[in-house]
Amino acid sequence: MNKIIQAACPHDCPDTCAMQVTVHQGQAIKIAGDPHHPTTGGTLCTKVSRYLERTYHAERLLTPLKRIGPKGLGKFTPVSWDEAFTDIAARLMAIAKENPERIVPYSYAGTMGLVQGESMAMRFFNQLGASRLDRTICSSAGGAGLSYTIGRVGMDMEFAQDAQLIILWGSNPIASNLHFWTRVQEAKRKGAYIVAIDPYRSLSAEKCHEHLALLPGTDGALALALAHVLIRDSLLDEDYISRHTVGFEGYKARVAAWSPERAAQVCGVSAAQIENLAVRYGKIALSGQGALIRLNYGMQRSRGGGNATRAVAVLPALVGAWKQPSGGLLFSTSGWYPINKAGLERPDLLEGKVPRTINMTEIAHALNGSGPYQQQEPIAAVMVYNSNPVAVAPDSSSVVRGFAREDLFCVVLEHFMTDTADYADYVLPATTQLEHLDIHRSYGHFYVLANNPAIAPVGDSLPNTEIFRRLAAKMGFNHPCFSESDEQIAAQAFDWKHPYLAHTSWQEVKEKGWAKLNVGNQAPFAEGGFPTASGKTEFFSAALAAQGLEPLPDYLPPLEATDSPLAKKYPLAMISPPARNFLNSTFVNVQSLRATEGEPHLDLHPLDAAKRTIVDGQRVRIFNDRGSFECKARVTEKARPGVVVALSIWWKKLAADGKNANEVTGQSLTDLGAGATFYDCLVEVEAANANSGQERENSV
Ligand code: SF4
């Protein structure tokens, strides 16, 4: 008899789908979207539709492994859990006795679950007094920009299909927000006008009515120019501005300097496109129809990403777009959730100590004692879970040099032998989402979801929580919080008495699979009430001013701008957005998905190809002062002139040259949120040495 288990997708995707797993005699035999869940609508994306292939993959790690060869070569021998825990505990305790801050956790969004993410793990590192990790690699610039402007909240995507204008800004929903795309298509069928703002003609951009292919990192200038036109032409909701914003006069003076002509020069689009979009946006919003901006993370991966986010996030207030349920802005909804972070992570275990903080974007500097980490105590141990920094962190050759240090003790919790696991001293097999319990919030909708275990752990794998629980016991940590079960942790993940959740409970969510936050109003900011210090949209941020930072939205050019002196040497701006069949570095080793992606490519415009006598299909070398990697050229007008696109994130060891796009990305940080600047990256491209791929094969 088959059983259907209610589950949730754990991946770093705003859709956070509700899933149903069919189990027959202990084996998962089918995975599908929950047809009753309003945003999932019975559909999973191509990636997670293959989750069973991933779960039962022949290369799943089944036992703890101990390194027996040089770092990086992936030579390991199986050991028992007890042997692994005993040795790891002894090594960590010896380091902690001298200075616990020399131990560093490294984790991100390998699972978005609140239980298997940072609950027991953070308790462990807090008890230890280890360094803290600033988790900046993806969204911190935009998150900070949003927080200083409207709060980390957005409109409800369940109304998006009613909008008359949808602007996909730095967003490719077909690849990374599929269920929002379904609603965009419905809106389009009902007559909505769809615009993409993206340096790349992505799968989504090519299906829009209009595409503004701006230069990477110039979004802030575009947003200021849109505001310039709205103010110049009096396309404003004066009443909304006066009641629900602060700092309009100063902002008005700022945008006066941003004529469409000036922004056109900076952004590499036409002034007419800017004029037309501003007028269309203003007219639709002011006529009481939904004007919606779907802002995603691409645009904040440049030096000025925080300010660019601020410059976009104020636009709906100018035209009163928040008054319609289908209008306003959707960037992240994560701030809606009444999460019980202190209960999950137990910062009280630090007993008032404030350990140093390592910025994860700068992990290469931190491991090598370079950059801002030169004067700091060297890192002696790193524990990696839910992440694969050797593939995903910037300045990759420096990351590898750091992880290759023979004096670094490295433990990796994983499903597979990733690029990072190859450098571990111990690799500990972790369970997948089908094998453990969890609870989820979303950053794209308003639901809390439960993930019930569908099958027993594969091999000897253990949930992350259990690995840290047993390691804590081995190290003599006897605080009662280390004895809590996953069920107890999930039950306290949210404040269930909060008005948004008072209508439900953990038990109900666990049984049904999901519950929607009751935020009380279909257009929650129709009457202001933003979760900012002033309760208003903040053109002027007193909090930024108090830190000595620019209080009004501003434009900061990329560090590596195409008109900078560096561009003489490296004239092409490179971006590395997600490939449709990968999610960060997850799924790259799933054969059916990798087969669809084929092999690493670099998309470049025919004009840029011709200048370098590069032809379609030719192997090319992409390089700058940080490093180089090779792949096949795809000569296409999907890339605009001056911009090259390396869809990512490939596992290095699955690429012919053993490298990926992060060889050339850098460790510089954004203006707000100290975030990563992956798309602030100038390169040059040339034909590759005909023997280079072969050279690697011979050396491996
Ligand atoms: S990756 Fe996103 S779209 Fe795909 S199943 Fe997970 S939540 Fe849904």
Image: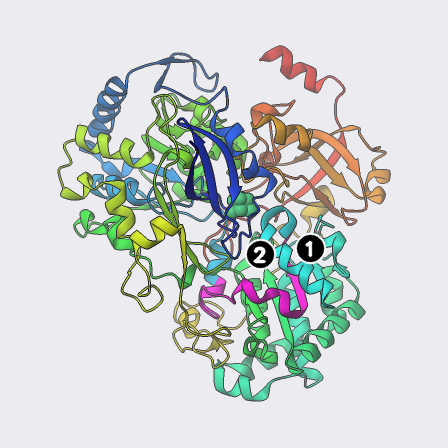
Stretch of the chain drawn in magenta: 145-172
Q: Residue at x 43, y 19 (%)?
A: 71
Going by the numbered disc 1, the residue's amino acid type is Asp
Q: Residue 322: where, in percent of width, then height?
A: 55, 76
For the N terminus, which image quadrant? top left
Q: Secondary structure at mark 2?
A: loop
Badge 2 crowding class, 10 Å Cα cut-off, few under 14, some 14 to 19, many 20 or more, is many
Q: Which residue is mark 1?
A: 198
Q: CA distance from mark 2 to mark 1?
A: 10 Å
- Residue 197 located left or right of residue 56: right
Residue at the outermost front position: 1
Looking at the picture, does residue 459 appear above or below residue 668? above
Looking at the picture, does residue 14 appear above or below residue 632? below
Report if residue 369 is visible in the image.
no
Badge 1 crowding class, 10 Å Cα cut-off, few under 14, some 14 to 19, many 20 or more, is many
Q: Residue 227: where, in percent of width, then height?
A: 65, 75
Going by the numbered disc 2, the residue's amino acid type is Asn
Report if residue 161 is visible in the image.
yes
Residue 448 forms part of the magenta stretch: no
Q: Residue 50: where, in percent of width, then height?
A: 56, 33
Q: Residue 331: where, in percent of width, then height?
A: 53, 61
Q: Which residue is mark 2?
A: 296
